[in-house]
Every structure is written in C-alpha cells, then in structure tokens.
Amino acid sequence: MKITVDEVKCCGAGQCVLIAPEVFDQRDEDGIVVLLDSEPAEEHHAAVHEAASVCPAAAIELSGTR
C-alpha cells in the first residue's frame, strides 16, 4: 500500500489521526495532515482504509491496495 495526501484539499478535521495515529499526524499551526508513513505495515492497512474513507475532504489517496 502506498499513501499520498493532498495538503491543499485537507480541511484539518483530524479523523485520520484519530483512526491511524501511527500513519497520520497534524501540523500544530494549521491542523493540516502530516503523513508519517507513506508505506505502512500491513497491520495498519485496515485503519488507513478507514481513515481514507471517512476523510471529509477526500485528501487521502491509496494505491496498490486490494
């Protein structure tokens, strides 16, 4: 799995951080997503899928997934 995030689209809702804190964080100054791991271990894939699906701005894109 490869993750990319579009910082321009990100609205800073923080759902990704709540769901997958090992993979996502937020900048302190504006809440925009920070990608901590663009190719997370398989044990994090379910959480990353959930984070991408609930992102209100559709700022998380996944490739190489089932």
Image: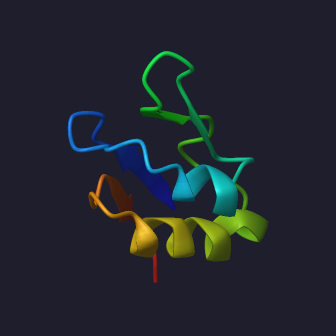
What percent of the width, then of the height, locates residue 53? 41, 75
Query: Which picture quadrant has residue 9?
Result: top left
In the rendered structure, the answer to whether residue 38 lies left or right of residue 44 reads left
Question: Colour scheme of this structure image?
Answer: rainbow
**Outermost residue, left side:** 8
- Identify the residue shown where x is 30% and y is 34%: 7
- Identify the residue shown where x is 72% and y is 58%: 41
What percent of the width, then of the height, locates residue 23? 65, 47
Q: How many dots with numbers?
A: 0
What percent of the width, then of the height, locates residue 3? 44, 51
Question: Eyeballing the image, is 19 above or below 36?
Answer: below
- Identify the residue shown where x is 52% and y is 73%: 49
Question: Eyeballing the image, is 42 above or below 7?
Answer: below
- Identify the residue shown where x is 55% and y is 56%: 16
In the rendered structure, the answer to whether residue 20 lies left or right of residue 64 reads right
Q: Is residue 35 or residue 2 the one in the foreground?
A: 35
Question: Eyeballing the image, is 3 above or below 62?
Answer: above
